[in-house]
Amino acid sequence: MNKKTKVVIGSRGSDLALWQANFVKKELERKNRNIVVDIKIIKTMGDKILNFPLSKIGDKSLFTKELEIQLLEKKIDLAVHSLKDLQTQIPDGLKLSAVTKRHGAEDVLIARKKGVTILNLKEGATVATGSLRRECQLLHLRPDITTVELRGNVPTRIKKFLKSNWDAIILARAGVERLKLKKYISSYIPTNLMLPAVGQGALGIEIHKDNIFIDELLQKIHHEDTYSAVLAERSLLKTLEGGCQVPIGAFAELKPNGLYLDAMVGSLDGTITFRKRMRGSKKKPELLGKSLAKELLKAGAKSVLKEIYNSSRRS
Protein backbone atom coordinates (compact mmCIF):
# COMPACT_ATOMS: atom_id res chain seq x y z
CA MET A 1 0.00 0.00 0.00
CA ASN A 2 1.42 3.39 -1.02
CA LYS A 3 2.19 5.80 1.81
CA LYS A 4 0.29 9.08 1.41
CA THR A 5 2.22 12.32 1.06
CA LYS A 6 1.58 14.75 3.91
CA VAL A 7 0.67 18.32 2.96
CA VAL A 8 0.51 21.08 5.59
CA ILE A 9 -1.81 24.09 5.26
CA GLY A 10 -1.06 27.19 7.33
CA SER A 11 -4.16 29.02 8.56
CA ARG A 12 -5.26 31.67 11.02
CA GLY A 13 -7.36 30.33 13.88
CA SER A 14 -10.64 32.19 13.38
CA ASP A 15 -13.81 30.27 12.49
CA LEU A 16 -13.77 31.70 8.98
CA ALA A 17 -10.06 31.04 8.38
CA LEU A 18 -10.53 27.43 9.52
CA TRP A 19 -13.59 27.05 7.29
CA GLN A 20 -11.42 28.24 4.37
CA ALA A 21 -8.50 25.92 5.26
CA ASN A 22 -10.85 22.94 5.67
CA PHE A 23 -12.54 23.73 2.36
CA VAL A 24 -9.15 23.65 0.58
CA LYS A 25 -8.15 20.49 2.51
CA LYS A 26 -11.31 18.64 1.43
CA GLU A 27 -11.00 19.77 -2.19
CA LEU A 28 -7.34 18.73 -2.38
CA GLU A 29 -7.95 15.32 -0.76
CA ARG A 30 -10.97 14.72 -2.98
CA LYS A 31 -8.96 15.37 -6.15
CA ASN A 32 -5.68 13.75 -5.02
CA ARG A 33 -6.09 10.32 -3.41
CA ASN A 34 -2.38 9.99 -2.60
CA ILE A 35 -2.16 12.90 -0.13
CA VAL A 36 -3.24 13.62 3.42
CA VAL A 37 -3.67 17.24 4.48
CA ASP A 38 -3.02 18.69 7.94
CA ILE A 39 -3.87 22.21 9.14
CA LYS A 40 -1.42 24.19 11.26
CA ILE A 41 -2.87 27.21 13.09
CA ILE A 42 -0.70 30.33 13.08
CA LYS A 43 -1.55 33.58 14.92
CA THR A 44 -1.03 36.75 12.92
CA MET A 45 -0.53 40.34 14.07
CA GLY A 46 -4.10 41.13 12.97
CA ASP A 47 -5.41 38.44 15.34
CA LYS A 48 -3.42 39.83 18.27
CA ILE A 49 -4.17 43.56 17.95
CA LEU A 50 -7.92 43.81 18.40
CA ASN A 51 -8.27 47.14 20.18
CA PHE A 52 -7.17 49.37 17.27
CA PRO A 53 -8.90 50.18 13.97
CA LEU A 54 -7.23 48.39 11.03
CA SER A 55 -6.75 51.72 9.28
CA LYS A 56 -4.67 53.01 12.20
CA ILE A 57 -2.37 49.97 12.34
CA GLY A 58 -1.55 50.42 8.67
CA ASP A 59 0.40 47.23 7.93
CA LYS A 60 -0.63 45.75 4.58
CA SER A 61 0.45 42.24 5.67
CA LEU A 62 -1.46 42.34 8.95
CA PHE A 63 -3.19 38.97 8.45
CA THR A 64 -0.53 37.26 6.32
CA LYS A 65 3.03 38.01 7.49
CA GLU A 66 3.42 35.19 10.03
CA LEU A 67 1.97 32.68 7.53
CA GLU A 68 4.41 33.90 4.88
CA ILE A 69 7.41 33.52 7.22
CA GLN A 70 6.39 29.85 7.76
CA LEU A 71 6.13 29.39 3.98
CA LEU A 72 9.58 30.90 3.39
CA GLU A 73 11.02 28.65 6.12
CA LYS A 74 9.22 25.67 4.47
CA LYS A 75 7.42 24.80 7.74
CA ILE A 76 4.09 24.75 5.86
CA ASP A 77 3.34 23.88 2.22
CA LEU A 78 0.60 26.38 1.51
CA ALA A 79 -1.21 29.27 3.18
CA VAL A 80 -4.91 29.88 2.61
CA HIS A 81 -5.97 33.53 2.75
CA SER A 82 -9.13 35.52 2.19
CA LEU A 83 -7.79 37.10 -0.99
CA LYS A 84 -8.83 40.56 0.23
CA ASP A 85 -6.25 40.18 3.06
CA LEU A 86 -3.37 39.30 0.73
CA GLN A 87 -1.21 42.32 -0.11
CA THR A 88 -0.68 43.02 -3.82
CA GLN A 89 3.12 42.77 -3.52
CA ILE A 90 3.86 39.09 -2.79
CA PRO A 91 7.18 38.66 -0.91
CA ASP A 92 10.20 37.40 -2.86
CA GLY A 93 10.35 33.61 -2.82
CA LEU A 94 6.57 33.18 -2.64
CA LYS A 95 3.79 33.11 -5.26
CA LEU A 96 0.03 33.17 -5.53
CA SER A 97 -0.45 29.65 -6.87
CA ALA A 98 -4.24 29.31 -7.05
CA VAL A 99 -7.49 31.19 -6.56
CA THR A 100 -10.74 29.37 -5.78
CA LYS A 101 -14.08 30.02 -7.44
CA ARG A 102 -15.52 33.20 -6.00
CA HIS A 103 -18.43 33.20 -3.58
CA GLY A 104 -20.85 36.17 -3.84
CA ALA A 105 -18.55 39.19 -3.53
CA GLU A 106 -20.99 41.78 -2.21
CA ASP A 107 -21.46 43.11 1.33
CA VAL A 108 -24.53 42.46 3.47
CA LEU A 109 -26.44 44.51 6.01
CA ILE A 110 -27.24 42.93 9.36
CA ALA A 111 -30.00 44.92 11.06
CA ARG A 112 -32.77 44.29 13.60
CA LYS A 113 -35.21 42.86 11.08
CA LYS A 114 -35.38 41.36 7.57
CA GLY A 115 -35.78 43.66 4.63
CA VAL A 116 -33.90 46.61 6.14
CA THR A 117 -31.56 48.08 3.52
CA ILE A 118 -28.95 50.84 3.67
CA LEU A 119 -31.44 53.03 1.81
CA ASN A 120 -34.39 52.52 4.19
CA LEU A 121 -32.46 52.53 7.49
CA LYS A 122 -34.02 55.13 9.79
CA GLU A 123 -32.68 58.67 9.59
CA GLY A 124 -29.61 59.22 11.79
CA ALA A 125 -29.07 55.46 12.20
CA THR A 126 -25.84 54.14 13.75
CA VAL A 127 -23.97 51.57 11.64
CA ALA A 128 -20.82 49.72 12.78
CA THR A 129 -18.04 48.72 10.39
CA GLY A 130 -14.28 48.22 10.56
CA SER A 131 -13.78 49.19 6.92
CA LEU A 132 -13.01 52.66 5.55
CA ARG A 133 -14.24 51.45 2.14
CA ARG A 134 -17.68 50.59 3.54
CA GLU A 135 -17.79 53.72 5.68
CA CYS A 136 -16.97 56.01 2.74
CA GLN A 137 -19.58 54.48 0.41
CA LEU A 138 -22.22 54.34 3.15
CA LEU A 139 -21.73 58.01 4.08
CA HIS A 140 -21.78 58.97 0.41
CA LEU A 141 -25.21 57.35 0.07
CA ARG A 142 -26.48 58.33 3.53
CA PRO A 143 -24.67 61.39 4.98
CA ASP A 144 -27.13 61.35 7.92
CA ILE A 145 -25.80 58.04 9.23
CA THR A 146 -23.33 57.82 12.13
CA THR A 147 -20.61 55.16 11.83
CA VAL A 148 -18.78 53.42 14.67
CA GLU A 149 -15.67 51.22 14.67
CA LEU A 150 -16.11 47.43 14.71
CA ARG A 151 -13.33 44.82 14.92
CA GLY A 152 -13.21 41.06 15.50
CA ASN A 153 -14.08 37.94 13.53
CA VAL A 154 -17.51 37.41 11.95
CA PRO A 155 -19.31 35.69 14.89
CA THR A 156 -17.78 38.21 17.34
CA ARG A 157 -19.02 41.15 15.26
CA ILE A 158 -22.53 39.71 15.11
CA LYS A 159 -22.52 39.08 18.90
CA LYS A 160 -21.32 42.66 19.52
CA PHE A 161 -24.15 43.94 17.33
CA LEU A 162 -26.84 41.89 19.11
CA LYS A 163 -25.70 43.29 22.48
CA SER A 164 -25.39 46.88 21.21
CA ASN A 165 -27.80 49.73 20.54
CA TRP A 166 -26.53 50.08 16.95
CA ASP A 167 -29.05 49.90 14.11
CA ALA A 168 -26.92 47.75 11.80
CA ILE A 169 -23.51 46.40 10.87
CA ILE A 170 -22.03 45.65 7.45
CA LEU A 171 -20.11 42.42 6.71
CA ALA A 172 -18.94 40.49 3.65
CA ARG A 173 -21.58 38.10 2.32
CA ALA A 174 -19.02 35.30 1.82
CA GLY A 175 -17.95 35.15 5.46
CA VAL A 176 -21.49 35.26 6.83
CA GLU A 177 -22.78 32.56 4.48
CA ARG A 178 -19.74 30.28 4.82
CA LEU A 179 -20.23 30.23 8.59
CA LYS A 180 -23.95 29.42 8.16
CA LEU A 181 -25.03 32.73 9.72
CA LYS A 182 -27.27 33.71 6.81
CA LYS A 183 -30.29 34.04 9.14
CA TYR A 184 -28.84 37.34 10.40
CA ILE A 185 -28.73 38.96 6.95
CA SER A 186 -31.34 41.69 6.54
CA SER A 187 -30.41 42.58 2.96
CA TYR A 188 -27.73 42.13 0.33
CA ILE A 189 -26.03 45.36 -0.73
CA PRO A 190 -25.77 45.38 -4.54
CA THR A 191 -22.39 46.31 -6.03
CA ASN A 192 -23.94 49.31 -7.81
CA LEU A 193 -24.47 50.82 -4.31
CA MET A 194 -21.36 49.51 -2.56
CA LEU A 195 -18.31 48.05 -4.26
CA PRO A 196 -16.59 45.21 -2.37
CA ALA A 197 -12.96 45.01 -1.31
CA VAL A 198 -10.46 43.83 -3.90
CA GLY A 199 -10.58 40.01 -4.03
CA GLN A 200 -13.59 39.77 -1.68
CA GLY A 201 -15.30 36.36 -1.82
CA ALA A 202 -12.29 34.50 -3.29
CA LEU A 203 -9.58 32.47 -1.53
CA GLY A 204 -5.95 33.00 -2.46
CA ILE A 205 -3.51 30.14 -1.94
CA GLU A 206 0.11 31.18 -1.46
CA ILE A 207 3.08 28.80 -1.71
CA HIS A 208 6.88 28.81 -1.84
CA LYS A 209 7.76 29.43 -5.49
CA ASP A 210 10.09 26.38 -5.55
CA ASN A 211 7.35 23.97 -4.44
CA ILE A 212 6.42 22.54 -7.85
CA PHE A 213 4.62 19.51 -6.36
CA ILE A 214 2.17 21.71 -4.41
CA ASP A 215 1.80 24.11 -7.32
CA GLU A 216 0.67 21.23 -9.57
CA LEU A 217 -1.73 19.88 -6.90
CA LEU A 218 -3.37 23.27 -6.55
CA GLN A 219 -4.10 23.65 -10.26
CA LYS A 220 -6.90 21.10 -9.78
CA ILE A 221 -8.83 23.55 -7.57
CA HIS A 222 -7.78 26.74 -9.36
CA HIS A 223 -10.58 28.77 -11.01
CA GLU A 224 -9.28 30.66 -14.04
CA ASP A 225 -12.25 33.05 -14.51
CA THR A 226 -12.08 34.19 -10.87
CA TYR A 227 -8.30 34.52 -11.23
CA SER A 228 -8.68 36.88 -14.21
CA ALA A 229 -11.22 39.01 -12.32
CA VAL A 230 -9.15 39.32 -9.14
CA LEU A 231 -5.94 39.99 -11.10
CA ALA A 232 -7.63 43.03 -12.63
CA GLU A 233 -8.77 44.21 -9.17
CA ARG A 234 -5.35 43.61 -7.57
CA SER A 235 -3.56 45.39 -10.41
CA LEU A 236 -5.84 48.41 -9.89
CA LEU A 237 -5.13 48.42 -6.13
CA LYS A 238 -1.38 48.08 -6.69
CA THR A 239 -1.38 51.00 -9.13
CA LEU A 240 -3.34 53.12 -6.64
CA GLU A 241 -0.99 51.95 -3.85
CA GLY A 242 -3.98 51.24 -1.62
CA GLY A 243 -4.32 49.30 1.62
CA CYS A 244 -6.51 49.25 4.74
CA GLN A 245 -6.04 53.01 5.20
CA VAL A 246 -7.72 53.94 1.92
CA PRO A 247 -11.38 53.73 0.80
CA ILE A 248 -10.98 51.75 -2.43
CA GLY A 249 -13.58 49.33 -3.79
CA ALA A 250 -13.43 47.22 -6.95
CA PHE A 251 -15.32 44.43 -8.65
CA ALA A 252 -14.41 42.67 -11.89
CA GLU A 253 -16.80 40.39 -13.74
CA LEU A 254 -16.31 38.23 -16.77
CA LYS A 255 -19.01 38.55 -19.42
CA PRO A 256 -19.24 37.02 -22.93
CA ASN A 257 -17.86 40.20 -24.52
CA GLY A 258 -14.98 40.81 -22.10
CA LEU A 259 -13.83 41.51 -18.58
CA TYR A 260 -15.56 44.45 -16.86
CA LEU A 261 -13.94 46.28 -13.97
CA ASP A 262 -15.86 48.72 -11.77
CA ALA A 263 -13.87 50.69 -9.17
CA MET A 264 -14.13 53.62 -6.75
CA VAL A 265 -11.86 55.80 -4.65
CA GLY A 266 -13.34 58.09 -2.02
CA SER A 267 -12.57 60.50 0.78
CA LEU A 268 -12.79 59.24 4.37
CA ASP A 269 -16.04 61.14 5.03
CA GLY A 270 -17.66 59.99 1.77
CA THR A 271 -18.22 63.54 0.50
CA ILE A 272 -16.00 62.92 -2.54
CA THR A 273 -16.04 59.70 -4.55
CA PHE A 274 -14.65 58.86 -7.96
CA ARG A 275 -16.11 55.83 -9.69
CA LYS A 276 -15.42 54.45 -13.15
CA ARG A 277 -16.06 51.27 -15.14
CA MET A 278 -14.00 49.85 -17.99
CA ARG A 279 -14.03 46.82 -20.26
CA GLY A 280 -10.87 44.89 -21.12
CA SER A 281 -9.59 41.49 -22.20
CA LYS A 282 -9.70 38.38 -20.00
CA LYS A 283 -6.22 37.66 -21.33
CA LYS A 284 -4.84 40.98 -20.08
CA PRO A 285 -6.52 41.56 -16.70
CA GLU A 286 -3.57 43.43 -15.19
CA LEU A 287 -3.55 45.90 -18.05
CA LEU A 288 -7.25 46.58 -17.41
CA GLY A 289 -6.60 47.20 -13.70
CA LYS A 290 -3.72 49.55 -14.42
CA SER A 291 -5.67 51.47 -17.09
CA LEU A 292 -8.71 52.01 -14.86
CA ALA A 293 -6.51 53.09 -11.94
CA LYS A 294 -4.88 55.71 -14.16
CA GLU A 295 -8.32 56.95 -15.27
CA LEU A 296 -9.40 57.33 -11.64
CA LEU A 297 -6.20 59.18 -10.75
CA LYS A 298 -6.69 61.49 -13.73
CA ALA A 299 -10.32 62.16 -12.70
CA GLY A 300 -9.19 63.50 -9.31
CA ALA A 301 -8.60 60.44 -7.11
CA LYS A 302 -4.90 61.39 -6.91
CA SER A 303 -5.56 64.42 -4.69
CA VAL A 304 -7.96 62.44 -2.44
CA LEU A 305 -5.38 59.66 -1.97
CA LYS A 306 -2.61 62.18 -1.31
CA GLU A 307 -4.71 63.89 1.37
CA ILE A 308 -5.48 60.53 3.08
CA TYR A 309 -1.82 59.46 3.07
CA ASN A 310 -0.71 62.82 4.44
CA SER A 311 -3.31 62.78 7.23
CA SER A 312 -2.41 59.17 8.20
CA ARG A 313 1.25 60.19 8.48
CA ARG A 314 0.27 63.09 10.76
CA SER A 315 -1.92 60.98 13.06
Image (tube, rainbow, N blue to C red):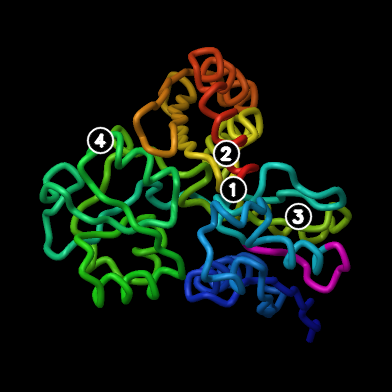
The vertical placement of 287 against 105, above or below, is above
Q: Secondary structure at mark 4?
A: helix
- Of callouts 3 and 2, the N-terminal one: 3
Residue 279 position within the rendered picture, expressed as x and y whole percent measured from the top left = 47, 18
Q: Is label 3 or label 1 in front?
A: 1
Q: Amino acid at mark 3?
A: Glu
Badge 2 crowding class, 10 Å Cα cut-off, few under 14, some 14 to 19, many 20 or more, is few
For residue 315, the mark is: 1
Q: Secondary structure at mark 3?
A: helix
Residue 235 position within the rendered picture, expressed as x and y whole percent measured from the top left = 63, 32
Whether 182 is among the magenta residues is no
Q: CA gap, disc 3 to disc 2?
A: 45 Å
The magenta-colored residue range is 72-80
Q: Is residue 113 left or right of residue 106?
A: left
Q: Residue furthest bottom?
A: 1
For residue 141, the mark is: 4
Q: Secondary structure at mark 1?
A: loop
- Of callouts 4 and 2, the N-terminal one: 4
Q: Is residue 307 left or right of residue 140?
A: right
For residue 216, the mark is: 3
| Quadrant hosting residue 54 | bottom right
Q: CA gap, disc 1 to disc 4?
A: 27 Å
Q: Is label 3 or label 2 in front?
A: 2
Q: Is residue 259 left or right of residue 192?
A: right
* Tag 1 and tag 4, C-beta contact below 8 Å: no
Task: Kindly identify the residue that appears in the image at 11 percent across and 54 percent down.
Answer: 115
Residue 125 position within the rendered picture, expressed as x and y whole percent measured from the top left = 18, 53
Q: Which residue is mark 2?
A: 311
Badge 1 crowding class, 10 Å Cα cut-off, few under 14, some 14 to 19, many 20 or more, is few
